[in-house]
Image (cartoon, coloured by chain):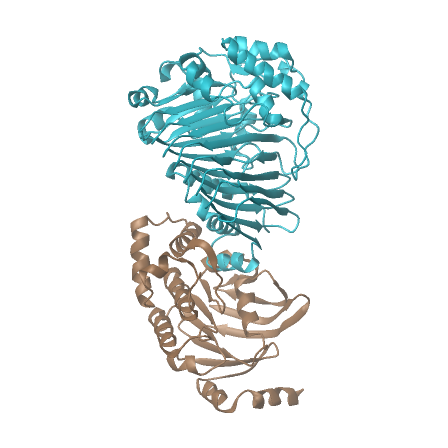
């Protein structure tokens, strides 16, 4: 579904991604790990079309479409979802209004009528249950006054409503206690089908105990320097990143 | 602009183009016969207006005194506004649609006029049938049709044009006209007092809760005419009324002057809610054309435990100069001001309120939300004054500015004057910029930028929007979004 070839991207003239190659197929779970500053979050921002980043080279196709030509909202409509590392607060905008705007924008893209109020509320109820988000939370302003755990659960709740084909979870485990982590991970697992895929960006093995990856990549200095099975994550947990850094730096 | 040639109207095709162009949604001109007097202002014009309207001698005297006083005044320049020189002799001071003076039923209203209201989305029939709002529609200067008047009359509520009120209830009008905003108040108040053409009059008798929202829809139609309405609302002891005012004007290249006065008197334990959605033509994106909205609005909370609440959503006008105020004379009286002021492109707004505490234990709340985009300038100007004898008073002011561009300006000018030490005044102010991360978050969820701006801005203004009656809230929400189209990106 996703094909990234030799992707280079920069922010403020500084190149962060220096030739990423990655293929994701339906049904797969990929983990992208790596030390701080290696470009993990940049990759998720570039894929979802954050305006601060400029793609300087390479191509990305998503179900055959040139992803880089699409606006951020069209990428969303095509089925790309980002669970933000730091979900922003939008004061005064209730989650209900926000999600209705999001869902109806998607329906419009596919020439569907907006969902009726009752159908929409029913859908909200169903999806809330997946991450055990209570009713009160959904009627509050977007992320305003949410705890760290509530914010992340709220991200997965939105994922459940929008039913993306490819979800990128950007450090969804950061700032979560063990119970919240479990709820979030279970939510993600419930949403998994053979037709969708997930990219999990994380520093730690911890999350991968719950969301089992098929393939693990290590990102370092803007490139994917190692790709292997789930055992790689365990090895990284044990040995840290230094040995990989050395391998890469010595190879130059 | 020079003479009545200006009443010529553009072709229908152009109208449709204008309406569908997407910039200003109400930019059509209605093709009806309008009676416009030649431009210029002198005593003869004042006398003419009074005569045409068949006014009593005392009102003519009132106008003439105001006119003579106006001659001694200069236009105020203290606001943070760049106001071009206005040639007051180039304006026509009276324009009335040539229809029968007092239509008795809907059938008698000029069909062209009704079409105009239909385009504005305030079809009188529909409103009469469905929403139970009594509408006093003011087109140019003469009140066209007052609905529900009979029904209100049963309760003793008077809701009619001010011209009719002068004829039918001269004692009430004489008692209250100019009692809150004197013709000596300021330059524009003097001008209005001299030449006001029409407006609305509301009287709620003792103990009556007006069962429906009263609504006036203002619209400036004829070219080169100023509009000078005058609204007078009196709520007697224990009365309650909610009053809505909506404004639109057609698109024209030249600037049009709008200098209105709203006076409100609130007696013992009475309450008045006054809501405005102001959408006068703001000019084009380069600042050509648009309405100069120089308005004096003031309420006198005369009675103990009286309450006056102003809610305004201001999105239109090239220049806005407007400070809806409360004089809290009664003990334990309450004044409120909730405002959203949006400026885009080259618009300028200097708006806010005055809370004058004279009565003991009087309380006031000010919530002002400014939203600036493009190259606009948006100022909040507010005065809180607590007199020496007004002990135990409270004021809370919250004044927020939201910036949508790097080229706009947001300014805050609070004046606080407290003359006793048993009163408490609080002032909070914030300035924020709509942030890229919020927009991207919305985009990532599939919400296009224009809609995202609408969502974020409405969220920001929610505290004020929630104060609007339901009928207005939906329209006002759309308006916020429409007036900020293409302002981010």
Answer yes or no: is residue B144 visible.
no
B15 vs A144: above or below: above
Given residues B293 and A47, the one toward you in this image is B293
Image location (x, y in percent) of residue B279: 52, 34
Answer yes or no: is residue B416 visible.
yes
Q: Which chain is cyan?
A: B
Given residues A68 and B85, the one toward you in this image is B85
Given residues B249 and B212, the one toward you in this image is B212
Given residues A56 and B72, the one toward you in this image is B72
B44 vs B150: above or below: above
**Residue at 56%, 66% in the rendered image:** A46
Image location (x, y in percent) of residue A234: 45, 88
Location of residue B467 (image quadrant): top left
**Residue at 33%, 71% in the rendered image:** A190
In-image side of A55 versus B266 (left or right):
right
Image location (x, y in percent) of residue B267: 40, 30
- Number of labelled discs? 0
Q: Quadrant of the C terminus of chain A?
A: bottom right
A170 vs B477: above or below: below
Q: Which chain is brown?
A: A
């Amino acid at each position: 579904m996703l094909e990234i070839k030799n992707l280079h991207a920069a922010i403020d003239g500084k190149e962060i991604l220096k030739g990423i190659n990655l293929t994701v197929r339906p049904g797969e779970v990929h983990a992208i790990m790596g030390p701080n500053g290696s470009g993990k979050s940049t990759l998720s921002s570039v894929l979802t079309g954050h305006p601060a980043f400029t793609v300087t080279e390479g191509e990305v196709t998503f179900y055959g479409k040139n992803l880089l030509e699409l606006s951020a909202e069209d990428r969303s409509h095509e089925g790309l979802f980002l669970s933000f590392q730091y979900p922003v607060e939008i004061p005064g905008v209730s989650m209900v209004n926000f999600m209705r705007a999001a869902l109806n924008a998607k329906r419009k893209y596919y020439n569907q009528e907006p969902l009726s109020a009752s159908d929409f509320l029913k859908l909200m109820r169903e999806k809330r249950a997946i991450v055990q988000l209570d009713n009160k939370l959904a009627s509050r302003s977007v992320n305003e006054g949410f705890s760290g755990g509530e914010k992340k659960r709220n991200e997965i709740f939105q994922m459940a409503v929008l039913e993306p084909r490819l979800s990128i979870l950007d450090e969804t485990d950061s700032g979560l206690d063990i119970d919240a982590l479990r709820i979030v991970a279970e939510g993600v697992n419930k949403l998994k089908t053979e037709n969708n895929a997930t990219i999990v960006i994380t520093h730690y093995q911890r999350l991968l105990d719950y969301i089992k990856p098929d393939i693990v990549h290590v990102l370092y200095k803007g490139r994917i320097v190692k790709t292997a099975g789930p055992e790689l994550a365990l090895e990284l947990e044990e040995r840290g990143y230094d040995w990989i850094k050395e391998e890469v730096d010595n190879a130059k | 602009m020079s003479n009545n040639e200006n009443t010529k109207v553009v072709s229908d095709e152009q109208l449709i183009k204008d309406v569908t162009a997407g910039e200003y949604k109400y930019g059509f001109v209605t093709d009806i016969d309008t009676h416009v007097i030649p431009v210029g202002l002198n005593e003869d014009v004042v006398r003419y207006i009074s005569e045409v309207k068949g006014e009593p001698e005392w009102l003519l005297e009132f106008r003439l005194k105001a006119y003579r006083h106006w001659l001694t005044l200069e236009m105020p320049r203290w606001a943070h506004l760049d106001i071009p020189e206005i040639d007051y002799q180039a304006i026509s001071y009276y324009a009335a649609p040539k229809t029968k003076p007092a239509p008795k039923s809907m059938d008698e209203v000029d069909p062209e006029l009704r079409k105009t209201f239909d385009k504005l989305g305030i079809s009188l029939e529909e409103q009469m049938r469905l929403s139970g709002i009594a509408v006093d529609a003011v087109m140019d200067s003469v009140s066209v049709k007052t609905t529900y008047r009979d029904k209100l009359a049963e309760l003793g509520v008077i809701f009619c044009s001010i011209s009719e009120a002068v004829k039918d209830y001269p004692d009430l009008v004489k008692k209250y006209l100019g009692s809150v905003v004197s013709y000596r108040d300021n330059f524009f108040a003097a001008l209005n007092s001299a030449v006001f053409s029409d407006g609305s009059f509301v009287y709620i008798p003792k103990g009556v809760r007006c069962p429906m929202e009263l609504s006036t829809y203002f619209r400036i139609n004829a070219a080169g005419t100023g509009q000078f309405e005058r609204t007078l609302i009196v709520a007697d002891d224990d009365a309650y009324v909610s009053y809505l005012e909506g404004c639109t004007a057609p698109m024209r290249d030249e600037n049009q002057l709008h200098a209105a006065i709203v006076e409100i008197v609130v007696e013992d334990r009475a309450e008045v809610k006054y809501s405005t959605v102001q959408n006068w033509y703001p000019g084009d994106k380069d600042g050509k054309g648009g309405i100069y909205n120089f308005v004096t609005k003031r309420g006198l909370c005369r009675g103990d435990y009286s309450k006056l609440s102003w809610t305004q959503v201001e999105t239109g006008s090239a220049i806005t100069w407007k400070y809806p105020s409360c004089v809290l004379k009664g003990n334990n009286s309450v004044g409120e001001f909730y405002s959203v002021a949006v400026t885009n492109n080259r618009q300028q707004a200097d708006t806010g309120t005055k809370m004058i505490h004279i009565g003991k234990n009087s309380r006031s709340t000010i919530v002002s939300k400014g939203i600036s985009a493009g190259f606009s300038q948006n100022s909040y100007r507010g005065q809180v004054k607590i007199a020496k004898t007004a002990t135990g008073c409270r004021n809370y002011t919250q004044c927020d500015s939201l910036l949508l561009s790097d080229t706009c300006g947001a300014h805050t000018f609070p004046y606080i004057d407290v003359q006793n030490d048993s009163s408490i005044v609080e002032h909070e102010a914030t300035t924020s910029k709509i942030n890229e991360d919020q927009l991207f978050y919305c985009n990532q969820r599939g919400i296009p930028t224009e809609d995202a701006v609408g969502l974020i801005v409405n969220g920001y203004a929610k505290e004020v929007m929630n104060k609007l009656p339901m009928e207005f809230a939906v329209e006002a929400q759309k308006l916020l979004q429409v007036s900020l189209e293409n302002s981010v990106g």
